């Protein structure tokens, strides 16, 4: 067994801290963006207009059947091309961070849309009907009646997905970003002590994710059980391959 | 768009670029299936242990699940590949890094047996924690009366599991287990970080050699979709074949 030198972690703390901040930033943006676009995608999928529901279903199933890393590579390649098309400017450089953010928002919106769709479907049909009967239009009925109930039902499962998302941020390593893992890897190369740094990264993730999952469990136990049952039942009925989570 | 380059000779391996893609597919399958065997066996044992009325085994099983699912897969990959040989006794570590990789030369691979083993161990042990949760959920979803009836009839606890609980539980969890298999199959792409040239890695390598990024990513994506659909279809067949009439819900479709 080799000699351990954990003082190397103290020396590497500044670079590790900036890595963790980048991971958290990516996590925050992907979470908000993923839930926002995921909601729109779920609404499109449940729409009776085939022009909306088919492309939405196609996008979600496409993203969910390829590895997360493959999706990162795709958006890493596509984002600069699309940005150029959108802005019309040639040679506008899009950094790896922007591409990674686009990739994460896209992938997470596909994952979240499945959860949100189950959440919307867990709200009894009578609710939107009653809203329409009262004269509310589609957006009002969604915004004031259906979505608030759906989101309340989905809280535990959305938080669980958020923990998975936080773990998945480490995948940006593949495009060379200095996230928490990337920073540890870099510090390891500089100091030649990769063992201590990787163990440290693993422990930090373990502590954060374990505490977060205990918190989710606590919220779950203090919630009206019929609410969550409705969502999980819908999710399992969606059949194989359509469960939230996984890279 | 131009797809003809796929049939051109690639710079190494005496294959076309399509051949590279196929060797990537082969390694994706080999890593996924080997890891799935570990995940299924170990995950079933741990899942059962989480439900038995014995404190110590249950604690061990719970600890296992909490550790393996709360560390990102990529970090676990590095722990097995970089860290493990350094923290085992020195002779074993040297053997892992020196002799072991050359025991067998792998076909169509620019990586050694050691990379392959680390990837399979990592994916297998990680997925075992997810499989264990499914097995546990399957067992817990059965009415308590089934265990009690079994015990009342004079079955021992292992017999209750073998003849009463597990045959039902494994049928119930076919859909979530299918998605676990699809997850391991997609997660196998993380092995590219330790040098395994599986499907995703090959598609990127081809794009670097040919600058046909769109085409080579599309081919890999198409292969992933075909396999996903095939697995879903096969598992549907199996689910219906083994269904217990009137008990396991066939609904939802």
Image (cartoon, coloured by chain):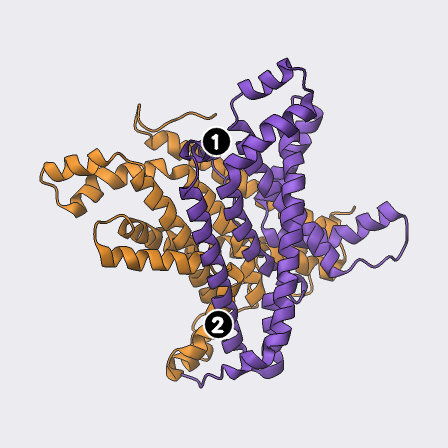
Chain colours: A purple, B orange
Same chain under badges 1 and 2? The reply is yes
User: Whole-percent x and y of residue A203?
Assistant: 47, 67
User: Whole-percent x and y of residue A154?
Assistant: 52, 38
Q: Residue at x 53, y 43 (%)?
A: A158
In the rendered structure, the answer to whether residue B143 lies left or right of residue A143 reads left
User: Whole-percent x and y of residue A98?
Assistant: 74, 56
B97 in relation to A234, above or below: below
Q: Residue at x 48, y 51 (%)?
A: B184
Q: Residues within 10 Å of mark 2 (few under 14, many from 20)?
A: some
A35 in relation to B245, above or below: below
Which sits earlier in the primary sequence, circle 1 or circle 2?
Answer: 2
Cβ atoms under marks 1 and 2 closer than 8 Å: no
Q: Quadrant of residue B8?
A: bottom right
The residue beneath circle 1 is A234
A245 in relation to B20, above or below: above
Figure disc tally: 2
Q: Residues within 10 Å of mark 1 (few under 14, many from 20)?
A: some
In the rendered structure, the answer to whether residue A23 lies left or right of residue A219 reads right
The label on residue B55 is none
* Secondary structure category for the residue under label 2: helix
How far apart are the alpha carbons under marks 1 and 2? 39 Å
Q: Residue at x 46, y 48 (%)?
A: A216
The residue beneath circle 2 is A199
């Amino acid at each position: 067994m080799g000699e351990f030198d954990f003082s190397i972690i103290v020396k590497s703390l500044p670079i590790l801290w900036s890595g963790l901040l980048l991971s958290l930033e990516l996590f925050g943006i992907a979470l908000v963006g993923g839930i926002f676009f995921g909601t729109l995608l779920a609404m499109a999928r449940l729409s009776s207009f085939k022009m909306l529901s088919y492309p939405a279903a196609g996008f979600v199933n496409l993203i969910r059947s390829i590895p997360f890393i493959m999706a990162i590579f795709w958006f890493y390649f596509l984002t600069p091309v699309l940005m150029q098309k959108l802005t019309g400017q040639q040679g506008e450089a899009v950094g790896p961070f922007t591409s990674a953010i686009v990739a994460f928002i896209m992938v997470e919106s596909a994952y979240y849309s499945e959860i949100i769709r189950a959440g919307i479907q867990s709200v009894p049909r009578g609710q939107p009907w009653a809203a329409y009967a009262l004269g509310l239009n589609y957006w009002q009925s969604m915004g004031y009646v259906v979505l608030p109930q759906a989101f309340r039902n989905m809280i535990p499962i959305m938080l669980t997905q958020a923990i998975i998302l936080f773990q998945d941020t480490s995948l940006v390593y593949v495009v060379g970003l200095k996230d928490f893992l990337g920073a540890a890897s870099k510090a390891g190369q500089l100091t030649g002590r990769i063992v201590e740094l990787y163990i440290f990264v693993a422990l930090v993730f373990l502590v954060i994710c374990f505490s977060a999952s205990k918190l989710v469990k606590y919220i779950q136990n203090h919630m009206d059980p019929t609410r969550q049952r409705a969502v999980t039942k819908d999710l399992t009925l969606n059949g194989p391959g359509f469960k939230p989570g996984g890279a | 768009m131009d797809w003809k380059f796929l049939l051109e000779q690639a710079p190494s391996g005496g294959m076309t670029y399509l051949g590279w893609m196929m060797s990537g597919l082969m390694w994706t399958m080999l890593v996924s299936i080997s890891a799935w065997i570990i995940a299924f066996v170990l995950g079933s044992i741990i899942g059962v242990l989480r439900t038995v009325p014995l404190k110590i085994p249950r604690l061990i099983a719970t600890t296992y699940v909490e550790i393996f699912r709360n560390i990102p897969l990529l970090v676990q990959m590095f722990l097995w590949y970089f860290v493990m040989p350094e923290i085992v006794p020195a002779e074993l570590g040297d053997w892992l890094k020196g002799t072991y990789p050359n025991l067998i030369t792998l076909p169509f691979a620019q990586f050694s047996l050691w990379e392959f083993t680390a990837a399979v161990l990592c994916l297998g042990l990680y997925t075992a924690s997810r499989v264990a949760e499914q097995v546990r959920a399957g067992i817990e979803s059965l009415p308590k009366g089934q265990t009690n009836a079994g015990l009342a009839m004079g079955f021992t606890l292992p017999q209750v599991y073998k003849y009463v609980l597990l045959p039902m539980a494994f049928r119930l969890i076919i859909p979530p287990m299918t998605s676990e298999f699809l997850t391991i199959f997609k997660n196998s792409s993380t092995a590219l970080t330790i040098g395994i040239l599986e499907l995703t890695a090959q598609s990127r390598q081809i794009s670097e050699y040919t600058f046909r990024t769109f085409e080579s990513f599309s081919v890999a994506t198409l292969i992933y979709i075909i396999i996903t659909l095939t697995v879903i279809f096969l598992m549907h067949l199996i689910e219906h074949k083994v269904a217990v009439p009137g008990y396991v819900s066939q609904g939802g479709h």
